[in-house]
Amino acid sequence: MTPHEFITKWQNSKLKERAAAQEHFLDLCRLLGEKTPAEVDAAGLDYGFEVGATKTGGGHGFADVFKRGHFAWEYKGTRANLDAALLQLQRYAVALDNPPLLIVSDIGTTIRIHTNWTNSVSKTYDIPIAELEDAEKRQWLKAAFADPEALRPTKTRQQLTEEVAGKFAELARSLRARYDEPEEVAHFINRLVFCMFAEDVKLLKEGMFSRMLERALEEPAEFEAFARDLFRAMSTGGRIGFEKVAWFNGGLFDNDRVFPLTPGEIRLVHEASKRYWGDIDPSILGTLFERGLDPDKRSQLGAHYTDRDKIMMIIEPVIIAPLAAEWAETKAKIEKLLEDAPKQTREKLLRGSALAARTRALNAAEQLHRAYLKRLRAFRVLDPACGSGNFLYLALRSLKDLEHRAQVEAEALGLERDFPTIGPEVVRGIEINPYAAELARVSVWIGEIQWMLKNGFPAQENPVLKPLETIECRDALLNKDGSRAEWPETDVIIGNPPFLGAKWMPDRLGADYVRKLRSILPNGSPAINLVVYWFFQASIAISRHTKRVGFVATNMIRSPSNRLIGDILYKLAPITFALSDEPWVVDGAAVRVSLIVCNSENSDSAFLDGLKVQAIGGDLKSYSFSMTKRKALIDNKRRRFGESKRGALSRSIEAARSTCCAFRSTPTDAITPTL
């Protein structure tokens, strides 16, 4: 089929979507020289029409056409709303293994390709049917069928985030030079950042913030008044002129404080606003902005940061794997109930006892599904050294993904689907640095909104931002009076506590603080690295309510002195997953660390450096038995272990004899047999 023939046939088509979709797609295959679904996959599992089960909301299949690893395609009637078609694909993308391309099309007007890669900025390719004689536009379609990678945007979300963070670091430096209020400057810049994001994801009326900046470029002296009006409206909801502004607040817009900007600074913000902020990466957003906003971390600008794949090494075994296993078990029970129940078809309607039996099975299956969702929605995660929120954002996203998958897969089995309800309330954080604590809240807010929109759901309203009082700005170890700080009750604990060697702690933290810190440990504890105090706190949480802990720690966690405290935790919750020597980034510097996951629930296996082992000791070595369950042998009492002393005796015979006489003992009382 030639482009002209295709355009002539379909441009003026009056056929309804259902009648025309498959023929339209088959004609596209002929136009592009691509094989049809039946020619490639007779079973229709990896390439076919109406893939997936009947949806509870109406319609058939998760997508009108699906090609695994390539695209999901949804058709609508001529000149229909393609945004609605995209929302449908986004809601079911997880059931289709998140294809890299989401394609929507009406019958006679437009084909629109949306990229769907996780770590790349988004891009849309619009292809009017009338322009299919254009070779470039046909090549875009050809790539969707044969080479999706050709359509992947070259810029990653990380690169975009680095660019905008650099712009605002420059603005922060400029403002701090004029105003000695670093925390207020940081709060102001966080508001500007969120306004850009809100505008690009259409939570602010399209172009509202950009138009304000354009007016301010013409009248720089009015910037302060313009921004104050906007912040005040976002705080409570309201209007600016004839345009409505949603209620945001959440604590970010708790007042209308604005710093006057110079024409150059307004231009800098305006340039930054031209980027698409909807694609910024919350997993690194906080880290990069913290370096620009916190004067103490200015030297780290441009340094390395920890990417999301590293953080997921902790989140996967602590959160995702156990909860996914619970869903797999629940889903198997649901499938068994429905498999054993009487079947109803168009040809055979159930009545009487058969209908009652199927109803009972569906009700039981629904109860299992809802019980799992209730469990998931009550699940809580704590990061007691949350920094700027990268662990918290990824934990929230993982829990939302689990809820979404459970909903979609239950719907495929014929059960009702709920609206996603897991939100920022499931994450708890403790952070002593006020810059980082606020950025943690911003990262979680942005991550929540991004997830909802990417998966085809509207962001919450009234307010758009829920207050995030669950992210506390305080010391995670000591209260102000020097007593041990309590942690909130949660199901799991994750994080990357600060690294600081024992000998450096008095100089960096103060001798009095370190003295109080040591007082919370069991009597006789040795001087230990700072990170180990988080392990001690986690052991208390495990003894009360927490089930799993996953921490990043310095390699010194394996040393004998640090293990004395670490073993308190390991006895309550043995190590079930560990990476003993991993590259990491701390304060912009590349270091080597150990990743440790402890599990208080029964576990049949342990994994050390990717290999299955029987048990893992506190020294992060594999054993055929649990080192945390070892006991002292009574027969070894008063026996000495170790090599003979090398070199001269440290004390003379005369000095030893005089010491023994002073304590009315003999040398044999102080000397034990050597094994």
Image: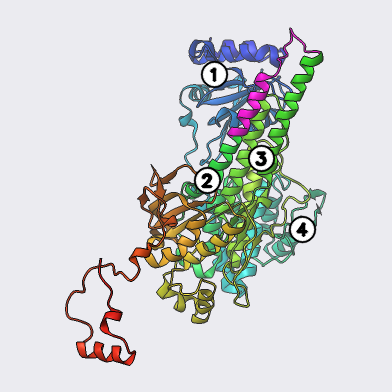
Range of the magenta residues? 328-351
Q: Amino acid at mark 2?
A: Asn
Please report contact status of discs 3 and 2: CB closer than 8 Å, yes or no.
Answer: no
Tell me which numbered mark, 1 or 2, is placed earlier along the sequence.
1
Is residue 454 found inside the magenta-colored segment of the image?
no
What's the mark number on residue 602? 2
Q: Nearer the viewer, residue 171 or 48?
A: 48
User: What secondary structure is found at the residue carrying circle 3?
Assistant: helix
Gap between marks 3 and 4, in whole Å? Answer: 22 Å
Please report contact status of discs 1 and 2: CB closer than 8 Å, yes or no.
Answer: no
Whether 346 is drawn above or below 293: the answer is above
| Residue 444 visible in rendering | yes
| Neighbourhood count class around disc 2 (C-alpha, 10 Å): few under 14, some 14–19, many 20 upward | few
| Residue 303 visible in rendering | no
Tell me which numbered mark, 3 or 4, is placed earlier along the sequence.
4
Q: Which residue is mark 1?
A: 45
Which quadrant would the C terminus be assigned to in this image? bottom left
Q: Which residue is mark 4?
A: 235
Q: Amino acid at mark 3?
A: Leu
Please report contact status of discs 4 and 1: CB closer than 8 Å, yes or no.
Answer: no
User: What secondary structure is found at the residue carrying circle 1?
Assistant: loop
Q: Which residue is mark 3?
A: 453
